[in-house]
Amino acid sequence: MKVLIVYYSMYGHIYKMAQAVAEGVRLVEGAEAVLRRVPETLPDPVLEKMGATAAQKQQAQVPVCTVEELGAADAVIFGTPTRFGNMCGQMRQFLDATGGLWVKGALVGKPGSVFASSNTQHGGQESTILSFHTTLLHQGMVIVGLPYTFQGQMTSTEITGCSPYGASTIAGGDGSRAPSENELAGARFQGQHVAKIAKKLAA
């Protein structure tokens, strides 16, 4: 059973969350976690000016996803940073190329899930995930969130991402905040949860 984790990460926050999601997927017997990044749309000089070069080099070993890989997976978990309460342009462009899958119904009935990041605690993580769900619903996917059985999302003792819609992390205004242990735990839980549901649907 193959669970595809498709993400975009400019500064590495979503990449770290994606790695945690993959760890969660691997906790389910028979589940294979496949990590893929979406194609970059910004030229290297722009990424350098934005201070994203180091993070991009860290992810160089992760293969770029193809549309066909979505159709071959048993479940897909998407990761995106927030851009004004919505998914990033790189992810949007990738998804806009999935019309052929839609025509074939290639994603109908497959679990689909989303995790996200934003700069601030109320910077749009939840709206990003919810608006992402619209695309998954058009593809006929079965939406999977982060249930309250992950109790870390109910903590009030620390600043943290995560909601019933999906795991999330807060990068900080200057991007210096790394995903917390609680946020990474939420990502692992989500990966495991999606893999369990995919396994049940495949039975």
Image: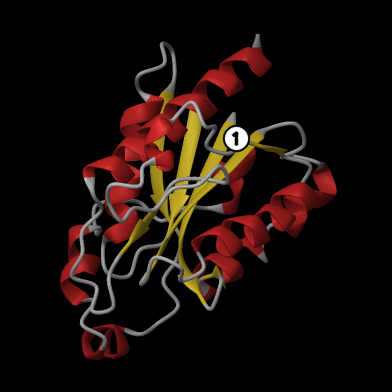
Query: Looking at the figure, which quarter contains the C terminus?
Result: top right
In the displayed structure, does residue 69 sit left or right of residue 27? right
Residue 51 position (above or below residue 190): below
Q: Position of residue 14 (x, y in %)?
A: 35, 57
In the displayed structure, does residue 46 sit left or right of residue 146? left
Indicate the quadrant where residue 10 lies.
bottom left
Residue 181 appears anywhere in the view: yes
Number of numbered markers: 1
Q: Nearer the viewer, residue 171 or 73?
A: 171
Q: Which residue: 35% across, 63% down? A: 9
Q: Residue furthest right?
A: 103
In the displayed structure, does residue 160 sit left or right of residue 134? left
Q: Which colour scheme is used?
A: secondary structure
Q: Nearer the viewer, residue 155 or 31?
A: 155
In the displayed structure, does residue 116 sit left or right of residue 107? left
Q: Position of residue 18 (x, y in %)?
A: 35, 46
Q: Position of residue 20 (x, y in %)?
A: 30, 39
Indicate the quadrant where residue 24 lies.
top left
Q: Where is residue 3 in the image (x, y as percent from the top left)?
A: 49, 31
Q: Which residue lies furthest to the front in this view?
A: 156
Residue 114 position (above or below residue 178): above
Q: Which amino acid does label 1 sit on?
A: Ala
Q: Which residue: 55% across, 58% down? A: 126
Q: Which residue: 23% across, 79% down? A: 174
Residue 73 appears anywhere in the view: no
Residue behind mark 1? 72
As helix, strand or loop, the secondary structure at mark 1 comes to: helix
Q: Is disc 1 surrounded by few (<14), some (14 to 19) or many (20+) residues within 10 Å? A: some
Residue 120 position (above or below residue 76): below
Q: Which residue: 58% across, 56% down? A: 129
